Amino acid sequence: MPYMRIGVSRERAPRERRVAVVPATVRIYREWAWDVTVEPGAGTAAGILDADYQAAEAVSGDPRGADCRLIVGPPSLEEVAALEAGSLLIGHLDPFVRPDLVAALRDGGVTALAVEAIPRTTLAQSMDALSSQATVGGYAAVLAAAAEAPRFMPMLVTAAGTIPPSRVLVLGAGVAGLQAIATAKRLGAIVFGYDIREDTREQVESLGAKFVAAPTEGADDGGYAREVSADTQERQLDILAPYVAESDIVITTAQIPGRPAPRLVSREMVESMSAGSVIVDMAAGTGGNVEGSVADDAVTIGGVTVLGPTNLASHVAADASRMYSRNLQELLARMRSDEGLDVDLDDEIVGGATITHGGEIVHPQAKDRR
Protein backbone atom coordinates (compact mmCIF):
# COMPACT_ATOMS: atom_id res chain seq x y z
CA MET A 1 0.00 0.00 0.00
CA PRO A 2 1.29 3.54 -0.76
CA TYR A 3 2.32 5.95 1.94
CA MET A 4 -0.35 8.31 3.28
CA ARG A 5 -0.18 11.07 5.86
CA ILE A 6 -3.27 11.82 7.96
CA GLY A 7 -3.50 15.25 9.59
CA VAL A 8 -5.60 16.14 12.62
CA SER A 9 -6.00 19.71 13.89
CA ARG A 10 -7.27 21.06 17.17
CA GLU A 11 -10.89 22.10 16.66
CA ARG A 12 -11.26 25.86 17.02
CA ALA A 13 -15.02 26.37 16.95
CA PRO A 14 -16.54 27.68 20.20
CA ARG A 15 -17.72 24.91 22.57
CA GLU A 16 -16.23 22.17 20.36
CA ARG A 17 -14.41 19.62 22.54
CA ARG A 18 -14.32 16.62 20.20
CA VAL A 19 -11.41 15.42 18.11
CA ALA A 20 -11.49 13.50 14.83
CA VAL A 21 -8.94 10.82 15.73
CA VAL A 22 -8.34 8.97 19.00
CA PRO A 23 -5.32 6.80 19.86
CA ALA A 24 -7.17 3.59 18.98
CA THR A 25 -7.73 4.74 15.40
CA VAL A 26 -4.17 6.07 15.17
CA ARG A 27 -3.02 2.50 15.80
CA ILE A 28 -5.19 1.25 12.94
CA TYR A 29 -3.75 3.84 10.55
CA ARG A 30 -0.25 2.91 11.64
CA GLU A 31 -1.07 -0.75 10.90
CA TRP A 32 -1.92 0.45 7.39
CA ALA A 33 1.60 1.98 7.29
CA TRP A 34 0.16 5.50 7.29
CA ASP A 35 1.62 8.35 9.30
CA VAL A 36 -0.63 10.44 11.55
CA THR A 37 0.26 13.98 12.57
CA VAL A 38 -1.78 15.44 15.42
CA GLU A 39 -1.63 19.09 16.39
CA PRO A 40 -0.55 19.53 20.05
CA GLY A 41 -3.58 19.87 22.31
CA ALA A 42 -6.01 18.46 19.72
CA GLY A 43 -7.46 15.91 22.12
CA THR A 44 -7.07 17.71 25.44
CA ALA A 45 -10.71 18.82 25.71
CA ALA A 46 -11.79 15.21 25.10
CA GLY A 47 -9.48 13.92 27.83
CA ILE A 48 -6.78 12.68 25.44
CA LEU A 49 -3.24 13.88 26.14
CA ASP A 50 -0.52 14.45 23.57
CA ALA A 51 1.38 11.62 25.27
CA ASP A 52 -1.52 9.26 24.53
CA TYR A 53 -1.20 9.99 20.82
CA GLN A 54 2.57 9.63 20.92
CA ALA A 55 2.18 6.24 22.64
CA ALA A 56 0.04 5.21 19.64
CA GLU A 57 2.88 6.33 17.33
CA ALA A 58 1.33 9.58 16.13
CA VAL A 59 3.59 12.52 15.41
CA SER A 60 2.92 15.68 17.40
CA GLY A 61 3.15 18.69 15.09
CA ASP A 62 1.61 20.84 12.37
CA PRO A 63 -0.78 18.79 10.21
CA ARG A 64 -0.51 21.12 7.22
CA GLY A 65 0.55 19.34 4.07
CA ALA A 66 -1.17 16.07 5.01
CA ASP A 67 -2.69 14.01 2.20
CA CYS A 68 -5.95 13.71 4.15
CA ARG A 69 -7.24 16.02 6.85
CA LEU A 70 -9.81 14.63 9.29
CA ILE A 71 -11.91 17.19 11.12
CA VAL A 72 -14.97 17.43 13.30
CA GLY A 73 -15.68 20.75 11.63
CA PRO A 74 -16.98 22.65 9.81
CA PRO A 75 -13.76 24.53 9.06
CA SER A 76 -13.46 28.28 8.74
CA LEU A 77 -12.81 29.83 5.35
CA GLU A 78 -9.31 30.69 6.58
CA GLU A 79 -8.67 27.04 7.39
CA VAL A 80 -9.91 26.01 3.93
CA ALA A 81 -7.59 28.55 2.30
CA ALA A 82 -4.62 26.89 4.03
CA LEU A 83 -5.39 23.47 2.51
CA GLU A 84 -3.33 22.29 -0.43
CA ALA A 85 -4.90 21.71 -3.82
CA GLY A 86 -5.45 18.01 -4.39
CA SER A 87 -5.71 17.23 -0.68
CA LEU A 88 -8.62 15.39 0.89
CA LEU A 89 -10.82 16.79 3.67
CA ILE A 90 -13.38 14.70 5.57
CA GLY A 91 -15.73 15.88 8.32
CA HIS A 92 -18.86 17.93 9.03
CA LEU A 93 -19.03 20.59 6.32
CA ASP A 94 -22.63 21.93 6.42
CA PRO A 95 -22.64 21.47 2.63
CA PHE A 96 -26.35 22.10 2.12
CA VAL A 97 -26.50 25.38 4.07
CA ARG A 98 -22.99 26.79 3.53
CA PRO A 99 -22.56 27.51 -0.19
CA ASP A 100 -19.67 29.85 0.65
CA LEU A 101 -17.73 27.02 2.27
CA VAL A 102 -18.49 24.62 -0.58
CA ALA A 103 -17.36 27.24 -3.12
CA ALA A 104 -14.11 27.78 -1.20
CA LEU A 105 -13.40 24.05 -1.21
CA ARG A 106 -14.07 23.88 -4.95
CA ASP A 107 -11.92 26.91 -5.73
CA GLY A 108 -9.10 25.52 -3.60
CA GLY A 109 -9.07 22.26 -5.51
CA VAL A 110 -9.87 20.30 -2.34
CA THR A 111 -11.68 16.98 -2.52
CA ALA A 112 -14.18 17.21 0.34
CA LEU A 113 -16.38 14.49 1.82
CA ALA A 114 -19.15 15.54 4.20
CA VAL A 115 -20.25 13.07 6.85
CA GLU A 116 -23.71 14.69 6.70
CA ALA A 117 -24.07 13.33 3.16
CA ILE A 118 -23.22 9.70 3.96
CA PRO A 119 -26.31 7.66 2.98
CA ARG A 120 -28.43 6.52 5.93
CA THR A 121 -28.37 2.88 4.88
CA THR A 122 -27.55 -0.42 6.55
CA LEU A 123 -24.39 -0.72 4.43
CA ALA A 124 -23.16 2.67 5.64
CA GLN A 125 -24.18 2.18 9.27
CA SER A 126 -20.63 1.89 10.62
CA MET A 127 -19.71 5.17 8.87
CA ASP A 128 -22.86 7.08 9.84
CA ALA A 129 -21.47 9.91 11.94
CA LEU A 130 -24.83 11.69 12.09
CA SER A 131 -26.31 8.70 13.89
CA SER A 132 -23.39 8.18 16.24
CA GLN A 133 -23.32 11.81 17.28
CA ALA A 134 -27.11 12.01 17.54
CA THR A 135 -26.93 9.10 19.98
CA VAL A 136 -24.59 11.12 22.16
CA GLY A 137 -26.75 14.23 21.75
CA GLY A 138 -29.96 12.51 22.83
CA TYR A 139 -28.27 11.21 25.96
CA ALA A 140 -26.73 14.59 26.78
CA ALA A 141 -30.05 16.40 26.24
CA VAL A 142 -31.71 14.42 29.03
CA LEU A 143 -28.81 15.05 31.40
CA ALA A 144 -28.89 18.77 30.59
CA ALA A 145 -32.61 18.88 31.32
CA ALA A 146 -32.23 16.87 34.54
CA ALA A 147 -29.46 19.18 35.73
CA GLU A 148 -31.62 22.25 35.10
CA ALA A 149 -34.90 20.86 36.46
CA PRO A 150 -35.83 21.44 40.12
CA ARG A 151 -37.43 17.99 40.39
CA PHE A 152 -36.26 14.39 40.67
CA MET A 153 -36.58 12.24 37.57
CA PRO A 154 -37.54 8.97 39.34
CA MET A 155 -40.25 8.33 41.90
CA LEU A 156 -38.79 8.27 45.39
CA VAL A 157 -40.45 6.79 48.46
CA THR A 158 -38.90 8.42 51.51
CA ALA A 159 -39.65 9.07 55.17
CA ALA A 160 -40.48 12.62 54.09
CA GLY A 161 -43.13 11.38 51.70
CA THR A 162 -43.43 10.00 48.18
CA ILE A 163 -42.00 12.08 45.35
CA PRO A 164 -43.76 11.41 42.02
CA PRO A 165 -41.64 10.80 38.90
CA SER A 166 -41.11 13.50 36.33
CA ARG A 167 -43.09 13.43 33.10
CA VAL A 168 -40.91 13.68 30.01
CA LEU A 169 -42.13 14.31 26.47
CA VAL A 170 -39.75 13.62 23.56
CA LEU A 171 -40.75 15.02 20.17
CA GLY A 172 -38.99 13.36 17.27
CA ALA A 173 -38.08 9.67 17.35
CA GLY A 174 -34.99 9.53 15.22
CA VAL A 175 -31.68 8.37 16.69
CA ALA A 176 -31.43 11.32 19.11
CA GLY A 177 -35.05 11.07 20.20
CA LEU A 178 -34.91 7.34 20.83
CA GLN A 179 -31.75 7.73 22.87
CA ALA A 180 -33.41 10.54 24.84
CA ILE A 181 -36.41 8.28 25.52
CA ALA A 182 -34.17 5.42 26.63
CA THR A 183 -32.11 7.67 28.91
CA ALA A 184 -35.15 9.29 30.53
CA LYS A 185 -36.65 5.85 31.15
CA ARG A 186 -33.43 4.65 32.77
CA LEU A 187 -33.57 7.67 35.07
CA GLY A 188 -37.06 6.65 36.14
CA ALA A 189 -39.27 9.20 34.40
CA ILE A 190 -42.68 8.61 32.85
CA VAL A 191 -41.95 9.13 29.16
CA PHE A 192 -44.11 10.01 26.17
CA GLY A 193 -42.81 10.11 22.61
CA TYR A 194 -44.05 11.36 19.26
CA ASP A 195 -42.88 11.42 15.67
CA ILE A 196 -44.74 12.27 12.48
CA ARG A 197 -43.51 8.96 10.99
CA GLU A 198 -45.96 6.18 11.82
CA ASP A 199 -43.29 3.46 11.70
CA THR A 200 -41.57 4.95 14.76
CA ARG A 201 -44.45 3.99 17.05
CA GLU A 202 -43.11 0.48 17.62
CA GLN A 203 -39.62 1.80 18.40
CA VAL A 204 -40.95 4.32 20.91
CA GLU A 205 -43.14 1.75 22.64
CA SER A 206 -40.34 -0.84 22.69
CA LEU A 207 -38.37 1.52 24.93
CA GLY A 208 -41.23 1.69 27.42
CA ALA A 209 -42.59 5.08 26.40
CA LYS A 210 -46.17 5.87 25.41
CA PHE A 211 -46.69 7.02 21.82
CA VAL A 212 -48.74 10.20 21.44
CA ALA A 213 -51.64 9.68 19.04
CA ALA A 214 -51.04 12.77 16.90
CA PRO A 215 -51.05 12.85 13.05
CA THR A 216 -48.55 10.55 11.34
CA GLU A 217 -47.30 10.21 7.78
CA GLY A 218 -44.78 8.09 5.88
CA ALA A 219 -41.10 9.00 5.75
CA ASP A 220 -39.29 10.21 2.63
CA ASP A 221 -36.96 7.98 0.60
CA GLY A 222 -34.08 8.74 2.96
CA GLY A 223 -36.07 7.75 6.05
CA TYR A 224 -36.50 11.34 7.21
CA ALA A 225 -39.75 13.02 8.17
CA ARG A 226 -41.44 14.93 5.36
CA GLU A 227 -42.33 18.60 5.61
CA VAL A 228 -46.01 18.64 6.61
CA SER A 229 -48.85 20.86 5.44
CA ALA A 230 -50.12 23.79 7.48
CA ASP A 231 -53.30 21.84 8.27
CA THR A 232 -51.34 18.84 9.56
CA GLN A 233 -49.11 21.10 11.63
CA GLU A 234 -52.14 22.78 13.20
CA ARG A 235 -53.62 19.40 14.14
CA GLN A 236 -50.24 18.37 15.56
CA LEU A 237 -50.09 21.41 17.83
CA ASP A 238 -53.67 20.93 19.02
CA ILE A 239 -53.02 17.33 20.08
CA LEU A 240 -49.53 17.94 21.50
CA ALA A 241 -50.59 20.99 23.54
CA PRO A 242 -51.99 19.13 26.59
CA TYR A 243 -49.03 16.75 26.63
CA VAL A 244 -46.64 19.69 26.68
CA ALA A 245 -48.64 21.42 29.43
CA GLU A 246 -48.47 18.32 31.66
CA SER A 247 -44.75 17.66 31.13
CA ASP A 248 -41.94 18.58 33.48
CA ILE A 249 -39.38 18.16 30.70
CA VAL A 250 -39.80 18.42 26.93
CA ILE A 251 -37.01 17.45 24.53
CA THR A 252 -37.42 18.25 20.84
CA THR A 253 -35.23 16.63 18.19
CA ALA A 254 -37.12 17.03 14.89
CA GLN A 255 -35.04 18.23 11.95
CA ILE A 256 -35.31 18.05 8.17
CA PRO A 257 -31.93 18.03 6.34
CA GLY A 258 -31.30 21.24 4.42
CA ARG A 259 -34.52 22.90 5.68
CA PRO A 260 -35.61 24.87 8.73
CA ALA A 261 -36.68 22.71 11.67
CA PRO A 262 -40.46 22.18 11.98
CA ARG A 263 -42.26 24.18 14.67
CA LEU A 264 -43.72 21.75 17.21
CA VAL A 265 -44.12 23.86 20.35
CA SER A 266 -45.67 27.34 20.26
CA ARG A 267 -45.01 30.06 22.78
CA GLU A 268 -48.50 29.53 24.20
CA MET A 269 -47.67 25.86 24.76
CA VAL A 270 -44.47 26.82 26.58
CA GLU A 271 -46.37 29.25 28.81
CA SER A 272 -48.90 26.51 29.67
CA MET A 273 -46.20 24.47 31.42
CA SER A 274 -45.62 24.67 35.16
CA ALA A 275 -42.96 27.05 36.42
CA GLY A 276 -39.64 25.26 36.77
CA SER A 277 -40.27 23.03 33.77
CA VAL A 278 -37.46 22.61 31.24
CA ILE A 279 -37.38 22.35 27.45
CA VAL A 280 -34.32 21.29 25.48
CA ASP A 281 -34.63 22.28 21.82
CA MET A 282 -32.04 20.21 19.97
CA ALA A 283 -33.07 21.88 16.70
CA ALA A 284 -32.38 25.42 17.88
CA GLY A 285 -29.46 25.75 15.47
CA THR A 286 -31.70 25.16 12.43
CA GLY A 287 -34.58 27.44 13.36
CA GLY A 288 -35.90 25.60 16.38
CA ASN A 289 -38.81 23.28 17.14
CA VAL A 290 -39.79 25.60 19.98
CA GLU A 291 -40.98 29.16 19.48
CA GLY A 292 -38.68 31.46 21.43
CA SER A 293 -35.68 29.12 21.74
CA VAL A 294 -32.28 30.69 21.10
CA ALA A 295 -29.31 28.76 19.74
CA ASP A 296 -26.64 28.17 22.38
CA ASP A 297 -28.51 30.11 25.03
CA ALA A 298 -31.01 29.59 27.84
CA VAL A 299 -34.12 31.75 27.96
CA THR A 300 -36.99 31.86 30.44
CA ILE A 301 -40.56 32.01 29.14
CA GLY A 302 -43.30 32.18 31.76
CA GLY A 303 -41.10 30.47 34.33
CA VAL A 304 -40.06 27.72 31.91
CA THR A 305 -36.37 27.35 31.04
CA VAL A 306 -35.78 26.78 27.32
CA LEU A 307 -32.31 25.52 26.38
CA GLY A 308 -31.06 25.69 22.79
CA PRO A 309 -27.78 23.74 22.67
CA THR A 310 -26.33 23.17 19.21
CA ASN A 311 -23.45 20.84 20.08
CA LEU A 312 -24.63 18.44 22.75
CA ALA A 313 -22.25 15.73 21.54
CA SER A 314 -19.36 17.83 22.82
CA HIS A 315 -20.76 17.50 26.35
CA VAL A 316 -19.68 13.85 26.21
CA ALA A 317 -16.55 14.57 24.20
CA ALA A 318 -14.49 11.47 25.03
CA ASP A 319 -17.02 8.88 23.90
CA ALA A 320 -18.37 11.11 21.11
CA SER A 321 -14.82 11.36 19.73
CA ARG A 322 -14.33 7.60 20.06
CA MET A 323 -17.48 6.92 18.06
CA TYR A 324 -16.82 9.63 15.46
CA SER A 325 -13.21 8.56 14.88
CA ARG A 326 -14.41 5.01 14.27
CA ASN A 327 -16.93 6.29 11.71
CA LEU A 328 -14.11 8.02 9.82
CA GLN A 329 -11.87 4.97 10.08
CA GLU A 330 -14.56 2.79 8.48
CA LEU A 331 -15.04 5.33 5.69
CA LEU A 332 -11.29 5.45 4.99
CA ALA A 333 -11.18 1.64 5.02
CA ARG A 334 -13.79 1.63 2.24
CA MET A 335 -11.75 4.18 0.25
CA ARG A 336 -8.39 2.49 0.79
CA SER A 337 -6.82 1.08 -2.37
CA ASP A 338 -3.48 0.26 -3.96
CA GLU A 339 -3.28 3.91 -5.04
CA GLY A 340 -3.91 5.32 -1.57
CA LEU A 341 -7.40 6.69 -1.07
CA ASP A 342 -9.78 6.19 -3.99
CA VAL A 343 -12.56 8.76 -4.31
CA ASP A 344 -14.90 6.60 -6.36
CA LEU A 345 -17.85 8.76 -7.34
CA ASP A 346 -19.71 5.65 -8.49
CA ASP A 347 -19.54 4.14 -5.01
CA GLU A 348 -22.89 4.64 -3.29
CA ILE A 349 -21.29 5.69 0.00
CA VAL A 350 -18.09 7.47 -1.04
CA GLY A 351 -19.71 9.10 -4.06
CA GLY A 352 -22.78 10.01 -2.02
CA ALA A 353 -20.62 11.81 0.55
CA THR A 354 -18.36 13.64 -1.91
CA ILE A 355 -19.16 17.35 -2.20
CA THR A 356 -16.25 18.72 -4.23
CA HIS A 357 -13.75 16.90 -6.44
CA GLY A 358 -11.45 17.91 -9.28
CA GLY A 359 -12.28 21.60 -8.90
CA GLU A 360 -16.02 20.98 -9.24
CA ILE A 361 -19.06 20.73 -6.98
CA VAL A 362 -20.20 17.17 -7.62
CA HIS A 363 -22.99 16.64 -5.10
CA PRO A 364 -26.40 17.48 -6.66
CA GLN A 365 -27.90 18.91 -3.48
CA ALA A 366 -24.84 21.09 -2.85
CA LYS A 367 -25.07 22.36 -6.45
CA ASP A 368 -28.67 23.41 -5.83
CA ARG A 369 -27.60 25.55 -2.86
CA ARG A 370 -25.27 27.76 -4.89
Image (cartoon, rainbow, N blue to C red):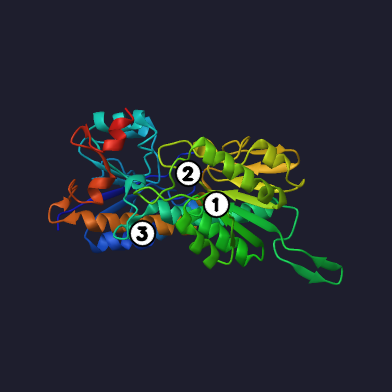
Towards the viewer: 72 or 36: 72
**In the image: residue 29, left or right of residue 134:** left
| Alpha carbon distance from label 2 to label 3 | 25 Å
Q: Indicate which disc, 3 or 1, sits on the residue closer to the N terminus.
A: 1
Residue occupied by mark 3: 326
| Alpha carbon distance from label 2 to label 1 | 20 Å
Amino acid of disc 3: Arg
User: Element at badge 2?
Assistant: loop
Q: Position of residue 40 (x, y in %)?
A: 41, 48
User: Element at badge 1?
Assistant: helix
| Residue at image location 30% in from the left, 31% down from the top | 368
Front label number (2 vs 1): 2
Amino acid of disc 1: His
**In the image: residue 347, left or right of residue 142:** left
Residue density around tag 3, few if under 14, some if 14–19, many if 20 or more, within 10 Å: many
Residue occupied by mark 2: 255
User: Element at badge 3?
Assistant: helix
Q: For the residues labelled 2 and 1, say whether their Cβ atoms are less than 8 Å apart.
A: no
Residue density around tag 1, few if under 14, some if 14–19, many if 20 or more, within 10 Å: many
Q: Indicate which disc, 2 or 3, sits on the residue closer to the N terminus.
A: 2
Residue density around tag 2, few if under 14, some if 14–19, many if 20 or more, within 10 Å: many
Q: Position of residue 319 (x, y in %)?
A: 47, 59
**In the image: residue 180, left or right of residue 152:** left
Q: For the residues labelled 3 and 1, say whether their Cβ atoms are less than 8 Å apart.
A: no
Figure quadrant of the N terminus: bottom left
90 in relation to 33, above or below = above
Towards the viewer: 38 or 241: 241
| Residue at image location 44% in from the left, 42% down from the top | 256
Residue 315: numbered disc: 1
